[in-house]
Amino acid sequence: MAQWQIDPQEYLKRLNLKQEEFKRRLKLPKIDEITKIIPLRDLKMIQSLIPIELELVLYLLRKIRTLDGQMPFGGINIQMVRIDPRHLKIGQKFVYRENYQRLLEEVPDIFRQFMVTAGGLGDLGAYFVFGLNGDDHYSMACYLPPVTEKHGSDLVIMDGIHRNYIAKQSGLAINVILVENVVLPFPCGVRCWLDVRVIPLAEKPKALEERYFDLNKGLFRDLKYLGIDG
């Protein structure tokens, strides 16, 4: 037996709110009005934020395809853990200065009206984000913490190198989605942070193969296939 209970109508009376006003203040998403699925950075105004449960994150990842159409995560297990990024391996050759600067300058404030973290980017979980894009169209974005794949004894950054780089430079642990039992090899060679260069976006190689160590392009994980953009 609960120690105390409040009837819903009595609760609204105590709040001095009508049910419709209470629903408005909850900022529930308007699913039927979504016009586009877009990157989080393209949302100019966030109106709703919905946490994604572990089982749905797992479902999303299992639907991810490689560029040659395979499904590397069909039988995976996942968990969200805190990791010191210094222990991770990297397949990308470059960190882009403007990208991590933008994360530092803009992202800490993007969820400021929602009480989801007091510790910054490294503490965020998984969310569906709803709001207006630059053309004022109601849109949805999917934010996931950095994704790390386990291959043998190596933990390799699959997505989120810039968030991990910021945490590494700050000496902080970061929330990551750890993926185990991946059925396909990692799409490129893996190195340590010492082999990764920081460069401006103006020097970003045009060819995908030039951005990764020994890339097997067909095995590249296409997160954008399901609108996941970190």
Image (spheres, grey):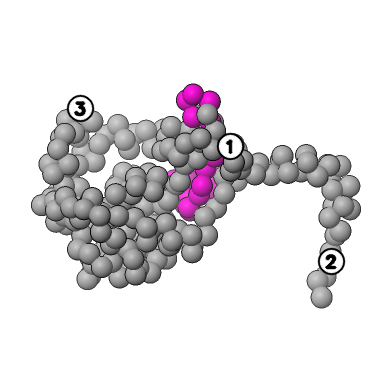
Judge by depth and name the residue closer to the eye, 14 or 55.
Answer: 55
Q: Image height check: is 96 above or below 10?
A: above
Label 2 belongs to which residue? 4
Q: Residue at x 44, y 47 (%)?
A: 143
Measure the alpha-carbon separation of dots 1 and 2.
39 Å
Residue 191 appears anywhere in the view:
no
The percent position of residue 123, horizontal first and vertical second, equals 47, 52
Q: Image height check: is 88 above or below 198?
A: below
Please report whichever mark, 3 or 2, sits nearer to the chain's N-terminal start. Answer: 2
Q: Residue at x 25, y 68 (%)?
A: 183
Q: Is residue 125 magenta?
A: yes
Mark 1: few/some/many CA within 10 Å (<14, 14-19, 20+): few
What kind of element bears circle 2? Answer: loop
Left or right of 108: which side holds 170? left
Amino acid, disc 3: Ala
Amino acid, disc 2: Trp
Q: Identify the mark at residue 33; answer none if there is no mark.
A: 1
| Callout 1 touching callout 2 (CB < 8 Å) | no
Left or right of 79: which side holds 66? left
Q: Is residue 213 magenta?
A: no
Q: Residue at x 45, y 39 (%)?
A: 37
Mark 2: few/some/many CA within 10 Å (<14, 14-19, 20+): few
The percent position of residue 228, horizontal first and vertical second, equals 39, 47
Amino acid, disc 1: Glu
What kind of element bears circle 3? Answer: helix
**Quadrant location of the N terminus in the rendered image:** bottom right
Q: Identify the mark at residue 202; answer none if there is no mark.
A: 3
What's the magenta region? 116-136
